[in-house]
């Protein structure tokens, strides 16, 4: 992180509230608490300390990302009730409770949370309201779309196939695959149509990045038409190579707005949790340099920069980040957390042969 970026954010004055709490996944955070241990043993003890509240938050985030929104909401609400909760964590908790309520269809409750969020950060509240409205519109659209009846006759299967072809040509590969698969299930399907359906399912899977699934379809296609199976395999391989070239293209433009910085941060968290620490570091550093970055996000960025550098073995710079972090949140033991990573790394080094 550039010194100028740190100086710019530190110069804003005060200790900004956290917008997203630092993650403790993969050993990157504080030691497991008694609260976490009790929960692992099946006991639903309410969090009491700030550390336990933070653990509850992380459990909530994991449940939310897995689509378990009721469970996520329970964890977020429990964290807000912890007597020792650091007040700076409240905006992020409210933000996540609002999104969980919206996902559960409780739009009124989500909007109420957004109003509360506005008491902490009016700018964030407007972003939150926009997200809730988008979710409400999406849910309304899903409710208004009655599922189409599954095709039964050969004629209906052919119509489903044609819809799939149209979706494929328009680049809507998931939709195309659904139509092709539905056509194959039609009881009255003319068996002579099956090879074309399998061919197109293979192509759609390849476009979606499911190369293994596409190859499996190609093997099935070979049972109908061995002469052309090699051609299908070659096309799948070409799509795979094309996707790889696309991934190797020049990196995306640097984030400029606070929203883009937050998206960059989330990509960094995903890379970190997957063990891709160099990639994570690039995302965190890019987010820290965004001109429109909200200063309140910087503590979490520094936290994650420190842990990522520690994972990469850059002890000196990790500890430098920890010193900077202490100017924001002096009571959180980041250095102790980093030391756990250093100790683990040293333990993995094989002994000398001497």
Image (spheres, rainbow, N blue to C red):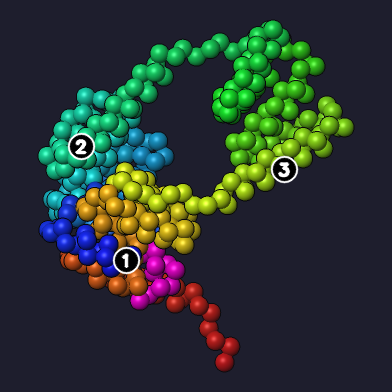
Q: CA distance from mark 1 to mark 3?
A: 43 Å
* Mark sitting on residue 2: 1
Q: Name the secondary structure under disc 2.
A: helix
Q: Which residue is mark 3?
A: 237
Image: 105 above or below 262 = above
Q: Is residue 332 visible?
A: no
Instruction: Give the quadrant of residue 298.
Output: bottom left
- What is the magenta range? 307-316
Q: Tell me the residue at 44%/14% (across/down).
A: 145
Rate crowding at label 3 as few (under 14), some (14 to 19) or many (20 or more) other CA atoms within 10 Å. some
Residue 322 rendering spot, x and y as whole percentages = 27, 69
Measuring 69% from the left and 7% from the top, which residue is drawn there? Answer: 155
Please say if 257 is above or below 182: below
x and y percentages locating residue 148 in the rendered image: 53, 12
Q: Determine contact: label 2, label 3, CB under 8 Å.
A: no
316 or 88: nearer the viewer? 316
Residue named by callout 2? 125
């Amino acid at each position: 992180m550039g010194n100028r970026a740190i100086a710019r954010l530190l110069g804003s004055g005060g200790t900004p509230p956290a917008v997203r709490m630092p993650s403790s996944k993969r050993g990157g955070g504080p030691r497991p608490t008694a609260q976490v241990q009790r929960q692992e043993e099946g006991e639903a003890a309410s969090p009491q300390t700030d550390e336990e509240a933070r653990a509850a938050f992380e459990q909530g985030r994991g449940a939310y990302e897995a689509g378990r929104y009721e469970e996520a909401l329970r964890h977020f609400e429990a964290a807000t009730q912890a007597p020792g909760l650091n007040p700076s964590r409240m905006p992020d908790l409210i933000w996540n409770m609002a999104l969980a309520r919206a996902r559960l269809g409780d739009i009124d409750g989500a909007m109420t949370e957004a109003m509360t969020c506005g008491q902490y950060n009016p700018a964030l509240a407007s972003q939150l309201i926009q997200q809730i409205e988008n979710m409400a519109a999406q849910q309304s659209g899903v409710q208004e779309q009655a599922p189409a009846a599954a095709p039964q006759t050969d004629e209906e299967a052919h119509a489903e196939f044609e819809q799939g072809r149209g979706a494929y040509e328009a680049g809507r590969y998931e939709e195309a695959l659904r139509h092709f698969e539905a056509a194959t299930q039609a009881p009255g399907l003319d068996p002579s149509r099956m090879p074309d359906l399998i061919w197109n399912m293979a192509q759609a899977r390849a476009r979606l990045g499911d190369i293994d699934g596409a190859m499996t379809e190609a093997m099935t296609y070979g049972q109908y038409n061995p002469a052309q199976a090699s051609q299908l395999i070659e096309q799948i391989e070409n799509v795979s190579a094309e996707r790889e070239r696309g991934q190797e293209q020049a990196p995306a433009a640097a984030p400029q707005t606070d929203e883009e910085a937050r998206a960059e941060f989330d990509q960094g968290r995903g890379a970190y949790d997957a063990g891709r620490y160099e990639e994570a570091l690039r995302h965190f550093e890019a987010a820290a340099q965004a001109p429109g970055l909200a200063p309140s996000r910087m503590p979490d960025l520094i936290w994650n920069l420190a842990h990522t550098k520690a994972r990469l073995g850059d002890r000196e710079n990790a500890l430098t980040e920890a010193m900077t972090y202490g100017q924001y949140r002096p009571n959180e033991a980041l250095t102790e957390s980093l030391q756990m990573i250093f100790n683990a790394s040293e333990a993995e080094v094989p002994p000398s042969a001497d």
